[in-house]
Image: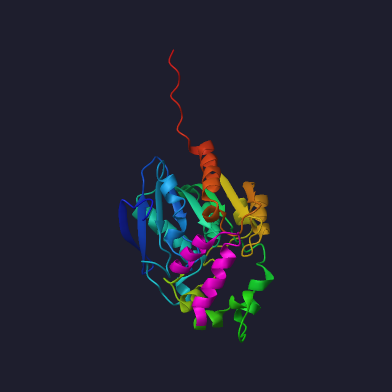
Amino acid sequence: MRAALPHTELIVENDGIKLHCEIYGQGDHTILFIPTWMFIHSRGYKAQIPYFAEQFRCITWDPRGNGKSDRPTDPKAYGQGQYVGDALAILDATDSKSAIVFGYSQSGPTCAILAAYHKDRVKAVVTVGTHTPLVPRFEHSNKDAYNSIVKNPKGWQKYNRNYWLTNLKDFAEFFSEQLFVEPHSTKQREDVLGWSRGTTGEILAASMAAPYAGHYTLDMTAYQRIACPMLAVHGRLDPIAPLAASEKVAELTGCELLIFDQAGHAPHARYPAKFNLVMRDFLARYFAKQKPAAGP
């Protein structure tokens, strides 16, 4: 049983791709939960949306490549340029002039591009386990390893294009364990495995072959243009996105950085109660309703 159901569902089209969008809650401010890598779909935010929908209007959608959205296999259909376009199309279709944007992992850079290039559409940014092109990924997921051909791969050797095309199920089991390295994470890993069935190895490979940012440039100058309030959260035990990525973003933007010492790549999903309070307090500093002035 789901903790909350959307009051509105709609299909939004961007560049010929249909996206399944859901809206929850009501409020003076909108939170746009931008989907991460299409390995999982919008249910990845199931621990945040019911909580924040009590005070905010919350919008999310299945990413191109998973769930109820279209699942193209052309690399040109993917990349940060397309993901930013999806977010803008969702804002327009839902009559949202601006929003607080939330990004996890791959959608952290999406939020950064939005905040740097579309300032009028972004009120604040919250990221979790973000990547950034300014910090190299871990060696175990580098480009050469990804494109290699390995017989009977073990561990991170499974983060490999050829293996995705032949044994996505086994990769999904491995990757779910990397998303949640914390003890007693069976339920979270099972959720990820279920969501991963909504995509294919061909789609994941297409996303990796896409142009990174389209016509945008996500460099130091872009990050330094971000002027809205921003919170970056990262797990110290993250084996997927280096902690140095969030540290670099904080250095360039001056944003708040909070490290979960005992968390891996998804502290918002593994420790939702703690994370939601952190995010709530951050938002309250900027978007709490003002008390009426005292009378004479």
Residue 122 versus residue 108 in the image, above or below: above
Q: Look at the image and tell me whether residue 192 can be seen.
A: yes
Q: Is residue 154 left or right of residue 43?
A: right
Residue 18 versus residue 165 in the image, above or below: above
Can you name the residue that lies furthest to the top here? 296
**Quadrant of the image containing the C terminus:** top left
Asked whether 183 falls inside the magenta stretch, the response is yes
Q: Look at the image and tell me whether residue 209 can be seen.
A: no
* Residue at 59 percent of width and 50 percent of height: 232
Residue 35 position, x and y percent, is 46, 60
Residue 206 position, x and y percent, is 49, 76
Asked whether 97 falls inside the magenta stretch, the response is no
Residue 157 position, x and y percent, is 63, 78
Mark count: 0
Query: What segment carries the magenta color?
Result: 167-195
* Residue at 50 percent of width and 52 percent of height: 102
Q: Is residue 280 left or right of residue 251?
A: left
Q: Is residue 76 left or right of residue 23?
A: right
* Residue at 34 percent of width and 55 percent of height: 93
